Amino acid sequence: MELLADATRRRIIAMIAGRPMRSSLIAYELGLSRPAASRHLGLLEAAGLVRSFSSPLDGRARVCSLHPGATFPLIAWLAETGVGLPPPVGDPYLRAAAEMATATDLSTDSST
């Protein structure tokens, strides 16, 4: 899942994991232009992680949600990265690597 190496796409997944959101709200929340958010969403949709549909309230608006079939691939990807796991107990090198990955790679820095 090289697609999720991008922090913006990880943030989009995290945002819509809880509830479907309009693509314009995703763009606003992330501080992206609508075309930039649309490009990210298009890549996620092409990969089968996200689905979009017309809003029942306003047919012009697109609503995005996690694709129901994406749950297990996302969990598998997270398991491989170690996200959410406690740092390893025994090996100090592994602990330092886990702490460094958490501090740099997976930060929720709003500037990205």
Image: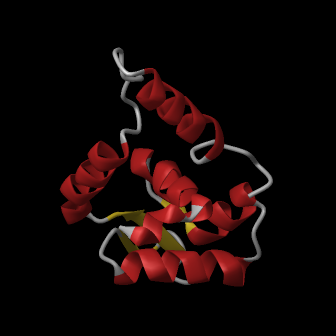
Residue at x-position 29% and y-position 48%: 80
Q: Is residue 79 left or right of residue 63?
A: left
Where does the image place residue 11, in percent across and percent down from the top left?
56, 54
**Above or below, comparing residue 92 to residue 11 in the picture:** above
Front residue of 111/16: it is 111
Residue at x-position 53% and y-position 28%: 96
Q: Is residue 3 left or right of residue 27?
A: left
**Above or below, comparing residue 91 to residue 20 in the picture:** above
Q: Which quarter of the rendering shows the N terminus?
A: bottom left
Q: Is residue 13 left or right of residue 1?
A: right
Q: Residue furthest top?
A: 89
Where does the image place residue 41, in percent across and percent down from the top left?
51, 75
Q: Is residue 61 visible?
A: no
Front residue of 111/30: it is 111
Q: How is the image coloured?
A: secondary structure
Front residue of 75/55: it is 75
Front residue of 93/26: it is 93
Counting every numbered tag in the picture gives 0
Residue 103: quarter of image = top right
Residue at x-position 42% and y-position 23%: 87
Residue at x-position 36% and y-position 28%: 85
Where does the image place residue 38, in percent across and percent down from the top left?
60, 80
Q: Is residue 18 visible?
A: yes
Residue 7: quarter of image = bottom right
**Above or below, comparing residue 94 to residue 11 in the picture:** above
Q: Which quarter of the rendering shows the C terminus?
A: bottom right
